[in-house]
Image (spheres, rainbow, N blue to C red):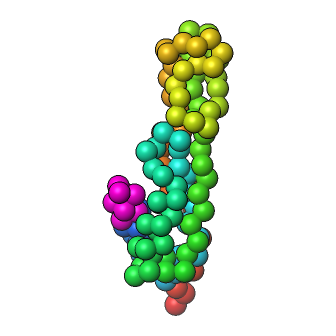
Amino acid sequence: MHEYSIVMSLMEQIEQLAKDNNANKIIRVDIKVGVLSGVEPHLLQNAFDTFKLDSVCNDAQLNMLLQPLVIECRHCNHKTELTERNVICPNCKSHDTRVLDGEDMMLMQLEMNTVTD
């Protein structure tokens, strides 16, 4: 399950951001998960819940925005938003499309408590 390695990388990024901002606790983690990212949201949630226990994210909530696939047809110039893994233009059935969004998984926002001196 590659979601574990993805969450490990995400935790490293979060730990560094927490350190850079003098945070002692992460409250909320917002990520964007694209349809074509290759990530299964429920497996990602399970991995996050496992790895957060020994981290600054111990009590953090993971919020996932599921990003639809956005394609543009090079044949008819039609832009389409899809919720399934399909790169065929629904307008003209062309395979000559390009992906505009929906391939990535990104950390979008963190809510954290910071340490004050």
For the point 52% across and 25% down, the residue is 87
Residues drawn in magenta: 1-8
Q: Which of these two is toward me, 37 or 28?
A: 37
Instruction: Give the quadrant of residue 3.
Output: bottom left
For the point 43% across and 66% down, the residue is 47
Instruction: Give the quadrant of residue 88.
Output: top right
> Looking at this rendering, what residue extends furthest in the top direction?
75
Question: How many callouts does the rendering have?
Answer: 0
Examine the rendered structure and indicate whether residue 22 appears above or below residue 67: below
For the point 37% across and 62% down, the residue is 4
Residue 64 drawn at (x, y percent): 59, 57
Q: Which part of the image, by quadrant, shows the N terminus?
A: bottom left
Most common SS among magenta residues: helix
For the point 51% across and 19% down, the residue is 97
**Residue 32 covered by magenta stretch:** no
Residue 114 drawn at (x, y percent): 54, 81
Residue 18 drawn at (x, y percent): 46, 73
Examine the rendered structure and indicate whether residue 33 appears above or below residue 51: above
Q: Is residue 25 shown left or right of residue 15?
A: right
Q: Is residue 45 shown left or right of residue 51?
A: right
Residue 58 drawn at (x, y percent): 49, 80
Residue 81 shows up from this direction? yes
Residue 106 shows up from this direction? no
Q: Which of these two is toward me, 24 or 10?
A: 10
